[in-house]
Amino acid sequence: MEEIYKLSHEEHEEILKEIMKNVFKGAKPQEKPKIFIMGGQPGAGKSTFINQLINSEEGKDCLIINADEYRAYHPKIKEIYTKHPEEMATITDLDVRDWTQRIFALAIQNRNNIIFEGTMRTPQICETIKDLHSKGYEVNVHVMAVNFYESKLSTYSRYEEALLNDEMPRHTPPEAHDETYGKMLKTLQQIEDDGCYNKITIHGRDKDVNLTPKEGENRVGSVMAILKHREKVWSRPKLQQYENWADNVISSMQNRGETRYISQVEELKTNAKQMTIVPAQKELSSLLLSLQQSKLCK
């Protein structure tokens, strides 16, 4: 199916020229260039943070490299979305991946300030960071520390909101979220071990949460900060807010006749209740469950 929508070489190159014209508009070479690498699982809130960054003094004169934004340039994107909404990313990747790589390479060659959004699902970004560091870039790594239940529900919510606003939604396969949630920590650990960065900052989904490992702290500090924030106990009002959010998503799905993912959202709503249990209680509950299962097996 993907090959059907693969652009010809000529069309591919013409569109790339158009994208580059827009991306590099006003971009200036820097004597001491910097890059902000934004990582986190789908639904973690990376886009919100990036919007804050580009409007700050720190993010001034940065160009944004985000593959998802380039999909809209595909001449048959509306047809692809209409016929294959859940495969849209896979289908367009045949062209988008090349556009993104070449835009990134040119930005580095031009010594532009860059904001790059990714998931950190694979360690490929580690080699990129090493290369940037060797070329004199100031490397700032920003990672989202967001709970599993919040980010996963956010992927469903984001899709429903886009449909309601008559926008082209981004479908996130549930398994893609889950895989990234676990693997991003391994990538972050490798970044820390390599040491080719200037600063790593850990952010929560809320604007007022910003966990930055202290200078001289053990290199596992960033990973531990993420784990600590992910497992932070929820208050009853927060759980109620989450349950209301899930109910709204389910209602939106029901109104448009969507049935495949409702059970998954309901499961998230049910399982999120464990976030109100303190760690010691969780361990006790787990132990009791194990004992009960042991008795049943006898």
Image (cartoon, rainbow, N blue to C red):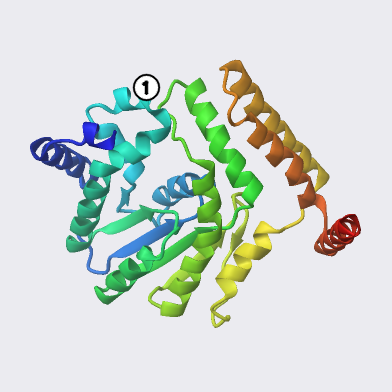
The number of callouts visible is 1
SS state under label 1 = helix
Quadrant hosting residue 125: bottom left
Q: Is residue 28 visible?
A: no
User: Which quadrant of the rendered structure holds the N terminus?
Assistant: top left
Query: Is 74 or 237 nearer to us in this picture?
Result: 74
- Give percent across and percent down for residue 234: 76, 50
- Give percent across and percent down for residue 103: 22, 51
Q: Is residue 20 left or right of residue 2?
A: left
Q: Is residue 114 left or right of residue 143?
A: left
Quadrant hosting residue 128: bottom left
Residue at 51%, 65% (x, y): give it.
Answer: 201
User: Which quadrant of the rendered structure holds the C terminus?
Assistant: bottom right
In the rendered image, the residue lying farthest to the front is 298
Q: Is residue 22 above or below residue 228?
A: above
Residue at 12%, 35% (x, y): give it.
Answer: 11
* Residue neighbourhood size for the residue with mark 1, other residues' Cα within 10 Å, grouped as few (<14), some (14–19), many (≥20): few
Instruction: Give amino acid for label 1.
Output: Thr
Residue at 37%, 22% (x, y): give it.
Answer: 82
Query: Is 160 or 57 nearer to us in this picture?
Result: 160
Q: Is residue 18 above or below residue 234?
A: above
Q: Is residue 109 visible?
A: yes
Q: What residue would you read off at disc 1? A: 82
